[in-house]
Amino acid sequence: MKTTVRQMRRYVQKIAKIAALDPVETKLAEDCIIGICKSGSCKVSDIVRALNVGKPLRKEARDFYDGLADQKSEIERLREAWLDFVAPTANNMPFIAVDPSDIIKPYGKQFDFLDVVRDASDREKRNGTGFPTVQIEATNHEHQNLSLWQETFSTKHPDFRGWFDFIARAMQKVLSRLGKSAIWLFDRGFDAGDFYTILRGFDVTWVVRQLQTRNVVFGDDQTMLMRDLAKTLIKPHETSVPYIDKKSHEVKSCPVRFGYAPVRLPGQQGRLWLIVITGLRADDMVLLTNEDIRCAKQAERIVRAYMRRWGIEAKNRRRGFSREKLELVPTNHFLLHARLRHSSAVADHQTQASRSLDRPGESLY
């Protein structure tokens, strides 16, 4: 364990050096990430207990709160330093998944800018108090995932300008460090005209899963509801796609059939491609992409690429770090929460890297 802790400290020190943090903030970052790795929690009291520093718990916890929530702190630079640190690896990964989610805080009454979100873990999908989040990760064909950017936000915050605007700013952070060779993968929540306008401005290759509720133009300028077109489209091509079994969390494969056709969105220029996949569930899955598909192999690549999004979601659900467990004190909770969220992501990837030290070729670092 001591060897692993030393490795973690050196690892955090590298990132802190890129961020140009002073020794005090570097030590705070080291202790925070090591405490998260040891405790499996980002609850400050658990972090302090795991560090076993010998000081009274209340005093040490207060020092952590004050350090992380200090609005004058430069520790926020760790996020961009992390992105600089992992960019060379991420540039060699073919896919980038954007995964919006929510953090439920049923007892977080003292949080600044506390929002109302849908509790996806609840069977009835009831609304609750918490924060929307977005996570951007790179992934590859070997099911390795690398967190690039993570953001917690609130529609109650005075700087909030809109959900898609917030996602676009997070994407811009990633694109400022990475090239544009990867395929960006988005779920149905991004099937909106305003977001397609944003994507055109980024000039990246993208795939968006469809709600199938919009009209599309195809053939000789015929307009049809996407769901109706998907039903009539022939699916002559076969492939096998990987997926994560929700019960066993094992990677399995599923045979599917697919077809594709060129379409346009009403009132917009530029040809897009519709891909319809059957065999996954009772309803067909429909994808829309701006990649210029010239053969079935290209369409198959898109199909298999999108399945990696599901892998990202499943991995996020089974992560060991309980980011929802966060103690409250009367201070800048929103900033504190965002910084702990980022620290838990770094700790997660550091743990994966440490476990792979004895397996050459498996570490992303």
Image (cartoon, grey):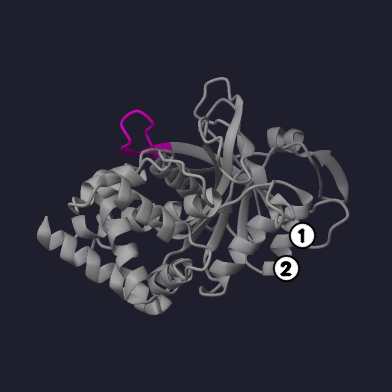
Name the residue nearer the viewer: 19 or 49.
Answer: 49
Q: Quadrant of the N terminus?
A: bottom left
Q: Quadrant of residue 130?
A: top right
> Residue 63 or 11: which is nearer the viewer?
63
Say which residue appears at 67% left-offset and 68% top-offset: 202
SS at badge 1:
helix
**Visible residue check, residue 39:** yes
Q: Is residue 244 magenta?
A: yes
User: In the image, 271: left or right of 150?
Assistant: right
Number of callouts:
2
Please provide the residue range marked out in magenta: 243-254
The residue indicated by pointer 2 is 201
Residue at 59% over, 61% down: 170
| Residue 161 placement (x, y as % from top left) | 74, 55
Magenta residue check for 364:
no
Image x and y of residue 75, in percent: 44, 67
Marking on residue 152: none
Residue 27 appears at what percent x and percent y? 30, 67
Looking at the image, the residue that sits furthest to the top is 124
Q: Which residue is mark 1?
A: 197
Residue 365 visible, this angle: no
Amino acid type indicated by mark 2: Gly
Contact (Cβ within 8 Å) of mark 2 with mark 1: yes
Q: Quadrant of residue 12?
A: bottom left
Disc 1 residue type? Answer: Thr
